[in-house]
């Protein structure tokens, strides 16, 4: 009997403990449920209030474990009210320049001290994970700010000194547009994967030399990315982009510049003749890229840039449209870039360029190609500390014109020179000049019937106004035929020759001739500011060759 009483008391004791545990569990569950609902309502109301009704935030499937500092939601929806923004703008209220539309999959937060956050203390969490976020950014008004303050100086009190140990964005999608009702996206990225280590939003992290964008390391990989250029005539795209701030690399594959307008549409938009260009680069790689310098000072500084297997095709219609305005030299292009930049070493491997044009009175396009193009360069910069007259940008290049004629040259450009000074020295290898007929016949209305070039050397000094130099070209048995005089418009090469001489007797068919020393052709060119730097260089080479042929007066034109 005594034993039964003991067993009964023991069972009663455990039942009592079980009841307590159950009661506490129910209390905690109800309390946690209430706490979760309170948190959800507080956050959603706070977003609506602080945005003055512009944003509507919804948290779906919110789960909170305050004791271990974890929180998760099945999805988040942040939707802007564009009409509300317009109304606030008209009333003179302070409004954001850009509105964000965010839809996510699962979101998880770990290691968050929620009580501290609720009382306005520093936000510190171990990890933030976002699955399949879709972000649409819409520009509501132009940015007129001359220079933005760093993020840590602009952050709200709640976000100052924010620390996140690890950030992971998986399969994100980004889109950027300039108008609320526009379906045309200026910028878009698919399948973006972002990993951020040790993010600290404070002054010390901003200035730290072992960090970039406040983080110890950022790794980014994307799928297809595209960008609509400001003129609306071209789209730039890449199949993939990879960034690693710690390894200091940027890698882009299958990069393309694609025209989205016809040559007629481009000419109408520009109000003048324009070059329609298609560009493809299977691989672009930056090494030694200082993300720290970009983060702190907006400087773009890299040790090396590699362009692999570049292919460029360009066409210009000079028959139906006229050149107008002033074309920039490379110096002026570099000086117009607002971002300070420097590339210590440049390498282009196995490039190909094809240029074609249609000139007045021509019945077909002329074209010239540069095959097997190899380029190495150094000190490409617009920064005064690197770019001086004594330390210019230097480009060494070799190619085969029309796939056959060897051409090597060195280009020295002090890119900050006010008068556009630069110098080109080069060498032409042995070739048959008749290979140039595809460009000469349709554009200059002459054809080379026969001849042989043994070699040639040239040295040209150029400014934004004119160029002078010398060319020595050794050739023999040159026979040139005039195809068509034409009429009106600017004269082609053949027309210039025939207008200066009555017949072809004046042309020296060989150099040297009759045992004499080789003639040295003078290069004298006044720059046509309506044409490109490439055309300027071409005119200089033509001037030297004409002078070598004995046509000095023609060469000066």
Image (cartoon, rainbow, N blue to C red):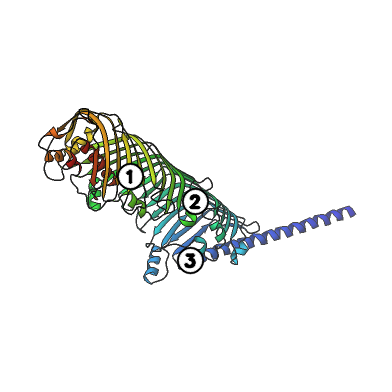
Residue 50 % position (x, y): 49, 67
Q: Residue furthest right?
A: 2
Residue 56 left/right relative to 167: left
Sequence-first disc among 2 and 1: 2
Q: CA distance from mark 2 to mark 1?
A: 33 Å
Q: Nearer the viewer, residue 143 or 70?
A: 143
Q: Picture coordinates of residue 462 (x, y %)? A: 29, 47
Quadrant of the image containing the N terminus: bottom right
**Cα–Cα span, label 1 and label 3:** 62 Å
State which tag comes first along the sequence, 1 or 3.
3
Q: Which mark is residue 48?
A: 3
Quarter-wise, where is residue 397 in the image? top left
> What is the C-alpha distance between the residues marked 2 and 3?
36 Å
Q: Which residue is mark 2?
A: 291
Q: Position of residue 82 (x, y in %)?
A: 39, 63
Q: Residue furthest bottom?
A: 91
What element does badge 3 sit on?
helix
Image position of 63 with respect to 496: above or below: below
Image quarter for residue 442? Answer: top left
Secondary element at image label 2: helix
Q: Residue 196 vs residue 370: left or right?
A: right
Label ID, residue 423: 1
Question: Please, which residue is most extreme toward the front here?
Answer: 516
- How many numbered marks, from 0 up? 3
Q: Which is more foreground, mark 2 or mark 3?
A: 2
User: Relative to 492, does residue 175 appear above or below in the rendering?
Assistant: below
């Amino acid at each position: 009997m005594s034993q039964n009483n003991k067993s009964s008391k023991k069972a009663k004791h455990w039942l009592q403990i079980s009841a307590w545990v159950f009661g506490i569990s129910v209390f905690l569950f109800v309390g946690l449920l209430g706490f979760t609902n309170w948190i959800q309502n507080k956050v959603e109301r706070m977003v609506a209030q602080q945005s003055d009704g512009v944003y509507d935030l919804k948290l779906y499937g919110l789960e909170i474990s305050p004791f271990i500092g974890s929180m998760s939601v099945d999805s988040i929806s942040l939707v802007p009210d564009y009409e509300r923004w317009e109304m606030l703008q008209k009333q003179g209220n302070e409004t954001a320049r850009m509105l964000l539309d965010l839809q996510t999959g699962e979101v998880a937060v770990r290691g968050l001290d929620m009580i501290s956050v609720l009382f306005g203390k520093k936000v510190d969490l171990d990890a933030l994970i976002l699955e399949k976020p879709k972000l649409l950014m819409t520009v509501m008004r132009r940015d007129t700010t001359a220079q933005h303050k760093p993020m840590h100086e602009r952050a709200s009190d709640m976000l100052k000194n924010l620390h996140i140990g690890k950030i992971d964005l998986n399969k994100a999608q980004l889109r950027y547009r300039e108008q609320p009702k526009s379906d045309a996206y200026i910028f878009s990225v698919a399948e973006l994967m972002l990993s951020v280590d040790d993010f600290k939003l404070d002054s010390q992290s901003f200035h730290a030399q072992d960090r970039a964008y406040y983080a110890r390391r950022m790794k980014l990989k994307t799928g297809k990315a595209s960008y609509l250029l400001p003129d609306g005539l071209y789209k730039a795209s890449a199949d993939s982009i990879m960034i690693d701030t710690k390894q200091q690399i940027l890698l882009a594959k299958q990069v393309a510049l694609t025209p989205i307008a016809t040559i007629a549409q481009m000419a109408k938009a520009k109000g003048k003749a324009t070059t329609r260009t298609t560009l493809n680069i299977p691989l672009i790689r930056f090494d030694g890229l200082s993300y720290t310098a970009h983060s702190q000072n907006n400087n773009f500084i890299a040790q090396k840039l590699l362009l692999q297997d570049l292919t460029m095709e360009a066409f210009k219609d000079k028959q139906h449209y006229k050149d107008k305005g002033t074309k920039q030299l490379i110096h002026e292009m570099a000086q117009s870039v607002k971002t300070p930049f420097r590339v210590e070493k440049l390498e282009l491997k196995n490039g190909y360029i094809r240029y074609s044009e249609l000139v007045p009175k021509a019945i077909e396009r002329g074209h010239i190609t540069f095959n097997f193009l190899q380029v190495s360069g150094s000190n490409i910069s617009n920064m005064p500390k690197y770019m001086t007259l004594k330390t210019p940008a230097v480009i060494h290049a070799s190619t085969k014109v029309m796939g056959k004629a060897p051409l090597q040259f060195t280009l020295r450009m002090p890119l900050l020179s006010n008068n556009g000074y630069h110098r080109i020295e080069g060498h032409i290898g042995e070739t048959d000049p008749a290979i140039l007929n595809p460009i000469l016949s349709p554009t200059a209305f002459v054809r080379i019937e026969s001849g042989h070039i043994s070699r040639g050397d040239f040295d040209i000094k150029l400014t934004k106004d004119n160029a002078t130099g010398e060319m020595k070209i050794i050739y023999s048995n040159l026979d040139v035929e005039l195809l068509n005089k034409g009429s009106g418009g600017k004269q082609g090469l053949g027309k210039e020759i025939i207008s200066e001489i009555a017949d072809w007797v004046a042309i020296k068919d060989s150099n040297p001739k009759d045992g004499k020393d080789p003639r040295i052709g003078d290069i004298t060119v006044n720059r046509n500011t309506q044409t490109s730097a490439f055309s300027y260089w071409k005119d200089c080479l033509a001037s030297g060759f004409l002078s070598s042929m004995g046509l000095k007066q023609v060469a000066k034109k």
